[in-house]
Image (cartoon, helix red, strand yellow):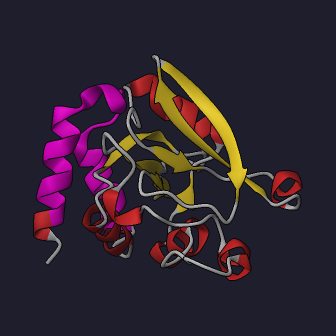
Amino acid sequence: MHDDLIHTLQARFGRHMHRHPGWTWDSVLARLALHPASLAVLQQMEDTGGEPDVIGHASDKGAVAFCDCSAESPLGRRSLCFDAAALSARKANKPTGSAMAMAQAMGIELLTQAQYRQLQELEPFDRKTSSWIATPTSIRALGGALFCDRRYEQVFVYHNGAESYYAGRGFRGMLRI
């Protein structure tokens, strides 16, 4: 079942070596073998249009970080408000769900602002879409949430009401293995 996924990940890894200097496919494959449950998470990332790829080391010793590297915010994760509280606060025209709940169900984390900026250093992403990012509790407590995109060759961080949702806004996630 996971053979197709492994083949897809290996091919993507080979096409985008600039995303993961210092990593070899054999070292990534060894890490995946130590954590076979991670393949189900990566499959969900792939199935929702995220095109996960290795973007470097995670903070843990020897851990690898996979991130959504689709050119635009993953298609299968758009039109979502920020979190469950925002979803329940919405009275009319509710979206089908929230970014935080979907990320949690998938087993991934929304990118932080710093992680999003690091991703953008690898290559341009979100030139037509935007992506919710992890939001500080102080901002969320006031009803807001943060999202990012890339326009005019710059990375921008914006705010919106957490209950808002747009067809062109989704979220990117990270899996540390």
Q: Quadrant of the N terminus?
A: bottom left
Q: Is residue 29 above or below residue 149?
A: below
Which region of the structure is painted magenta? 5-34
Q: Is residue 3 above or below residue 127?
A: below
- What is the x, y in percent for residue 152? 46, 17
Q: Nearer the viewer, residue 130 or 10?
A: 130
Residue drawn at (38%, 37%) of the image: 128
- What is the x, y in percent for residue 83? 66, 70
Q: Is residue 88 above or below residue 10?
A: below
Q: Nearer the viewer, residue 39 or 32?
A: 39
Q: Main secondary structure of the magenta part?
A: helix
The number of numbered badges drawn on the structure is: 0
User: Which residue in the rendered view is the most extreme toward the front?
Assistant: 92
* Residue 26 magenta: yes
Residue 36: name its quadrant: bottom left
Residue drawn at (28%, 52%) of the image: 51
Q: Nearer the viewer, residue 129 or 32?
A: 129
* Residue 43 magenta: no
